[in-house]
Image: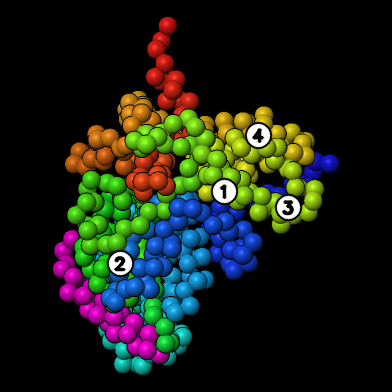
Amino acid sequence: MSDISFWKPVCQYFEVQAPLQTSEELEHLYVQRMNSPIEDLSSRLEMASAAISFLLAGHIGSGKTTELRKLEQTLKDYKVFWIDTATSLSQYNIGYAEIIVLIGLEIHSKVFQDEWGIEGNLLEGLEQSLMTVVREDKQITQEGFSVPEILQKWGLTLKGGLSKEITTKVDIRPNLENVIASVNDIIKAAENNLGRKLLMIVDGLDRHDQETALRMFSDELLTKLDCHIVYTIPISLRYSTNFSQPKERFTCLDLVNIPVFRCNPNGCPTSEADDNGRSLLTEVIQKRLQRLDDRYKDLFQPDALGLLCEKSGGVMRDLIRLCYEACILAKQNKLTIVDLPTSEAAIRKERGSRFNLHEYHFPRLAAIRQTGRLTSGVKSLTDREEMEICDEMLLNKLALGYRDASTGKPWFDVNPLIAEDVALWQTPLT
């Protein structure tokens, strides 16, 4: 049988590329990874006597949100407060001002819903500090609205970023400092009322482009909250030479990818399979199949699943997407298994649809493949802006980041999906 009734239950477990969110999902689908920094983060929280600002770096889809959700389950002494910038802020027109205002608005929303038992004067103080910024934005019409309604309406404008009149003509830093001070007053009161410390997680910042990400962390105000806070950032920002000074203000943690190949003692990539990494990735898929009945126990032939794990490069979301595409192709070919030819076809399709390689990529990818290290070199974005090519390759997952378990040092490799392209480029013409 090869029809919708057979394949639909499978695809439902592989079409969702979102993080594991619910307690049920984490209980049944989560796999403990050997390189997660979450244990380190948890230990630092336990030992800290003052607020710490963390940066959690990783590729998009590497599993940062899932790991933080798992952390939330283990932190009994903390109230975890989530802010998703991907849904609340513009992807391009964003800086530290928007993040600070968003934090203020989200805290206001929680308090206004009376979840934390905050006294009215503290809420009014936050409202007034936010209103000092609102009044600078001529795009907002205040007439006829109450303060909470104005703030709710203004929250929608953050999707487009603060108006240029604010960001270029008005010095709003003092106003933003007032917002931070008001938020800190509420944090202190909330921790007293709740009997727990507050951990704030600002998620989704890894989905913003490199220049935008650099602007976000250009000011130290993002470290001024009186609670522990975790910002998720793209791995390209973590290793960018342009970010060396700002990151000194943060505690940096890396969620690197699951290795599918081993590196040598010098941190150079090899062609030797990393059996531990591939076994973990296989377990990720098997846990999903275990939620189905016995018909699906051997749905993926071992060599087919092994190839999908390898070509995912150890990026969790990419593995799930490859398995989904393989299931769709198997259904179209009237199969009841995913065999090796089906996996190979899914990989070719993914390679053709995702990557746009240019000539300037190849020598740098070849160098990464040889040395395991990032190289220098820039490309022009505009007449006045440049971007490190390796930053671009990390951002677009042409190059992937790993960590040597024996030395703790980072190393890099070409995404296995394009490894053949790089090898072909290196082959002399005859």
User: Which is in the foreground here, disc 2 or disc 4?
Assistant: 4
- 391 sits to left or right of 273: left
How far is the residue under mark 2 from the one under mark 1? Answer: 30 Å
Mark 1 residue type: Leu
- 218 sits to left or right of 320: left
Q: Which mark is residue 56?
A: none
* Dot 3: element: helix
Q: Which residues fall within the magenta stretch?
A: 167-193
For the residue pair 264 and 37, the one nearer the viewer reads as 264
For disc 3, the marked residue is 9
Q: Residue at x 19, y 54 (%)?
A: 245
For disc 1, the marked residue is 280
Dot 3 or dot 2, earlier in sequence: 3
User: Which is in the foreground here, disc 3 or disc 2?
Assistant: 2
Q: Position of residue 182 (x, y in %)?
A: 27, 82
Mark 2 residue type: Ser
Mark 3 residue type: Pro
For disc 2, the marked residue is 53
How far is the residue under mark 3 from the one under mark 1? Answer: 23 Å
Q: Is residue 354 above or below residue 18?
A: above
How far is the residue under mark 3 from the one under mark 2? Answer: 42 Å
**Could you tell me what secondary structure mostly forms the magenta stretch?**
helix
Q: Position of residue 401 (x, y in %)?
A: 39, 43
